Image (cartoon, rainbow, N blue to C red):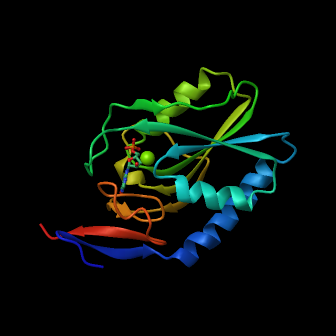
Amino acid sequence: MNHSNYIIEQLISAKSIAARVEGLALEISSAFKGTDKLIVIGLLRGSFVFIADVVRELDLPVEVDFLEASSYGNSTESSKEVRILKDLRGEIEGKDVLVVEDIVDTGHTLKHVLKLLGTRSPKRVEVCALLDKPSRREVDIKATWTGFEIPDEFVVGYGIDYAQRNRNLPFIGKVKFND
Ligand code: IMP
Ligand code: MG
């Protein structure tokens, strides 16, 4: 695929993603078996495709909510400053919660979000991240479930953007900059 100053190379196919989502959903369903309601929280915007696929495979009563936490700008570097741009609509006190994230990179976003959710006294909070870049981690945090570990590459597709573009690609691709 050709763009002005970068090309996108497929890293994970749509088929591999679908197979992994199915596996993750099985594990999540079993871990939360018996819950009267699981609150699945998607971190906007990067998780919107992933959460849509995950919830449709869950064998549990589910409620879906969204939170937008942002590092800023159209940059490829994640910021260490995390702001809440859009809060949840619902309460999570005493509830089982699953946070769905696209990528855990430095870990700052997830750490901040988990700290915030923790102040609201949920019964239990677990995290499902589609991608993990362990080599980029700056804070000690790990998702309960991870779809794929990837090297330190800038990726797009399946909900994930570069400067708000390429979220609609059905696969995960790595961005290769020309210079
Ligand atoms: P962290 O706070 O550094 O862990 O950043 C996590 C967020 O940075 C993710 O939710 C993404 O929105 C963004 N991000 C990290 N790596 C990439 C990437 O390779 N492509 C696009 N967005 C990324
Ligand atoms: Mg994000």
Q: Residue furthest left?
A: 179
92 w.r.t. 17: above or below: above
Residue 34 versus residue 16 in the image, above or below:
above
Q: As rendered, which of 161 and 113 lies closer to the eye?
A: 161
Q: Quadrant of the N terminus?
A: bottom left
Q: Is residue 90 above or below residue 53?
A: above
Query: What is the number of callouts on the image?
Result: 0
Quadrant for the C terminus, please: bottom left
Give the answer, above or below, for where 38 lies relative to 87: below
Q: Is residue 164 left or right of residue 95?
A: left
In x, y percent, where is residue 150? 42, 63
Q: Residue at x 25, y 48 (%)?
A: 75
Classify residue 64 as left or right of residue 71: right
| Residue 103 on image: x %, y % | 45, 52
Q: Is residue 140 visible?
A: no
Residue 58 visible to an observer of this rendering: yes
Residue 170 is situated, as x and y percent measured from the top left of the image, at 49, 72
- Residue at 41% from the left image edge and 55% from the top image edge: 133
Q: What residue is drawn where x is 61% and y is 71%?
A: 18
